[in-house]
Amino acid sequence: PEDALVGAWRKSAHNLWIKRLRRTSTLVELLQVLADFVGAINEDWLLQCKFPDGVVVETIASFASMPHTSSALALWLVKLDAIIAPYLDRVQTQKRQGNGKS
């Protein structure tokens, strides 16, 4: 969601994100792109979403100390996705139901 990111990431994030990801050819470059993305996450949005037990904030914070390996990165991404995906599914369902009632 747009509110999940801060600053310029809101307006140009999608295109910038795609370009930067496509240009990465090493794990180091990929980690840098993801570090920039993690830095752009709006922590206020995370807190408003009321994810269980602050697990998202903890996962985001663990990015900086994670080992710089492809396995660690893959595990971190899976954890983040597993936490956020149900929330996004709920939001999409609510939007569809709201649009259907109009």
Image: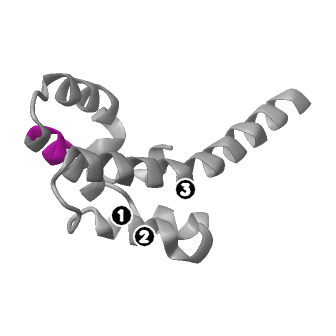
| Residue ID for mark 2 | 57
For label 1, count other residues whose C-alpha is less than 10 Å away and answer few (under 14), some (14-19) or many (20+): some
The vertical placement of 39 against 19, above or below, is below
User: In the rendered view, does 71 fall on the left or right side of 47?
Assistant: left
Label 2: which secondary element: helix
Residue in the image at 28% along x and 53% along y: 72
Mark 3: which secondary structure? helix
Query: According to the image, label 1 marks what residue?
Result: 60
The region drawn magenta spans 29-33
Q: Give, as a three-letter code, the residue at label 1.
A: Ile
Report the label total: 3
Residue sitting at x 13%, y 40%: 27
Amino acid type, label 2:
Val
- Horizontal and vertical percent position of residue 94: 77, 42
The reply to whether callout 2 and callout 1 are in contact (CB within 8 Å) is: yes
**Other residues around mark 3 within 10 Å, as few (<14) / some (14–19) / many (≥20):** some
Badge 2 or badge 3: first in the primary sequence: 2
Q: Which of the 4 quarters of the picture holds residue 63?
A: bottom left
